[in-house]
Amino acid sequence: MNIKSITLLVLLTGLTFAAFSQNKEQAFVNENLKFAEQQTQSMINSMGGNFAGKYPRSFNHKGELTTTDGNDWTDGFFPGTLWYLYELSGDTAWKNYAQEWTNPLESGKYNTSHHDIGFLMYCSFGNGYRLSPNEKYKAILIQSAESALKRFNPKVGSIQSWNYGKAWDGVTEWHFPVIIDNMMNLELLFWASKTTGDPRFRNIAITHANTTLKNHIRPDFSTYHVVDYDTATGAVKDRATCQGYSDNSTWARGQAWAIYGFTMTYRETQDPAYLNVAKKLADWYLHNPNLPADKIPYWDFNAGQDGYTPENKSKALTVTEKYRDASAAAIVCSALFELSELSKDKTYRKAAIEILHNLASPAYRAALGKNGNFLLMHCVGSIPHGGEVDVPIVYADYYFMEALQRYKKSMK
Ligand code: GLY
C-alpha cells in the first residue's frame, strides 16, 4: 500500500467510526424517547386519559400520584414535557395532549403573587409558541411578562421572589427575598422584548441578572439560595437558605438554576460577563470534591459537613442519608449542552453526555410502568420542609427531556 492508500484507509476508518458512534447516540436518544412516550402515556391513562384539572407533580412514598390544580409553580413542567415529546417524536398526538394541559394555565398570566410566572408560563405556552406559533399564545406570554415586571423594585434592582419571610419560628425576617432560582424566570422577559420590540422586559432582566451576579455568588462561584434586601436602601439584609442545608452551604438545585440561568442570559445578551460566570459556576459544580463520580449531586454540597450548621433544627435535617437530587443533575445537564455550544468548549458537552447517560441508567431512570410513571427517580424537593425526599419530581423529567432534545440537536 502506498502512502495515499493508507491515508484514505485511515480517513475511511475514522469516518466509519464517527458514523457508528453517531448512530449509537441517536439510538440512545430514540430509546429514551420511546421510554418517555410509553411512560407518559401511562401517566395520562392513570389520570383518566384526559386533563381533568390535574397536573402531575410527584409520586409519594405511599405509592400515590401527587397532583396540583394549575396554581402551583410546577404546573408548566408537565405540559412542557408533552411539548418536548411532540418536538422529539413529531407525533401530533403529543401536540394535542400538550395543548390540553397548556391551555387551562391561561389565567396564570395575571399572577403577580410570586416570581414563578416564568417557569409556569414559559415552559408551557413558551414551548407551545416555539413549536406552534399562534397569536393567542403570544398574547398570553406578553401579558405574563407584564405581570412579572410588577414584582420588580428599581431600588433593589431585582424581581421579588416570595412575599413571605422565614417561617420556622413564625417570625418574618425576610422582606424582599430573591432566590437564585429566579434567574430562570428571565427567559420569558428576554422573549417578550424580542417579540414586542419593547426594551423594558429585557432591561429589567439584565438589571436582575446583574444584581444576582453581585449578591448571590460567592467568590469561589458557589451560590447562596436566598438574598434578602432592604427596599428603602436596596442594601443586602440577609444571605441565607430555604431549601438547602445551611445558610453558608450550596444547595445543589440552586447551583443548577444559576448555571442554567446565566448560560441563558449570555445567549440572550452576548455579554461575556455572563458567559464567564456561567463557566465558573459550572466548573465549581463539575470539579467539586463532593460531587459523586456519576456527577449526580447530593441535595446539598455541604450537608452534614463541619462548618455548616442548619438554622432550622427540624427533624428532616437530622437525616444522615446523603440523598441525591436527580432534578439538579437534569437541569445542569441541559444547561451544559447550551454552555458548550455558546462557549465552544467541548468539555461541557462531554460532561453533559456523561450526566445524561447516568440519568438514563437504571440507577436513576425508572423501570417501565414504575415510579408513578415519572421518568426519573431520586429527586429531592425540600429536605428542610420534609417534602418530596427521594422521589420523582416533574421538573426533573422536564429538564431530562430538554437535555435529550438539546443532545439530539447538537448531533446535526
Ligand atoms: N424553585 C423551587 C425549587 O427549585 O424547588
Image (spheres, helix red, strand yellow):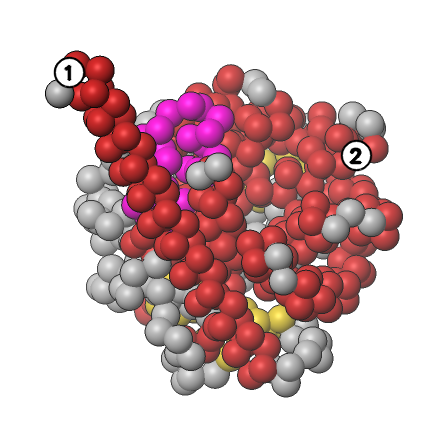
Please say whether residue 340 is one of the residues in the magenta stretch: yes
Residues 150 and 259: in front is: 259
Q: Residue at horizontal 24%, vertical 33%? A: 13
Would residue 363 be visible to someone looking at this image? Answer: yes
x%, y% of residue 121?
Answer: 70, 53
**Residue farthest left in this picture:** 1
Compared with 243, 179 (above or below) is above
* Magenta range: 333-356
Task: Please tell me in which quadrant of the rendered image residue 185 appears.
Answer: top right
Instruction: Give the dominant element type of the magenta stretch: helix, strand or loop.
Output: helix
Instruction: Tell me, yes or no, whether the two marked residues, 1 and 2, touch with CB atoms within 8 Å.
Output: no
x%, y% of residue 88?
Answer: 55, 54
Q: Amino acid at mark 1?
A: Asn
Q: Amino acid at mark 2?
A: Thr
The N terminus sits in image quarter: top left
Q: Is residue 328 left or right of residue 108?
A: left
Q: Which residue is mark 2?
A: 195
Q: Which residue is mark 1?
A: 2
x%, y% of residue 136?
Answer: 85, 52
Q: Residue at horizontal 48%, vertical 83%? A: 64
Q: Does mark 2 have its CB less than 8 Å from ligand 1? A: no
**Residue farthest front in this picture:** 1
Q: Is residue 136 left or right of residue 317?
A: right
Give the crowd class for mark 2: few <14, some 14-19, many >=20 residues within 10 Å: few
Q: Is residue 131 left or right of residue 410?
A: right
Give the crowd class for mark 1: few <14, some 14-19, many >=20 residues within 10 Å: few
Say whether disc 1 or disc 2 marks the residue closer to the N-terminus: 1
Compared with 284, 48 (above or below) is below
Q: Residue at horizontal 41%, vertical 50%? A: 26
Residues 161 and 9: in front is: 9
Compared with 55, 236 (above or below) is above
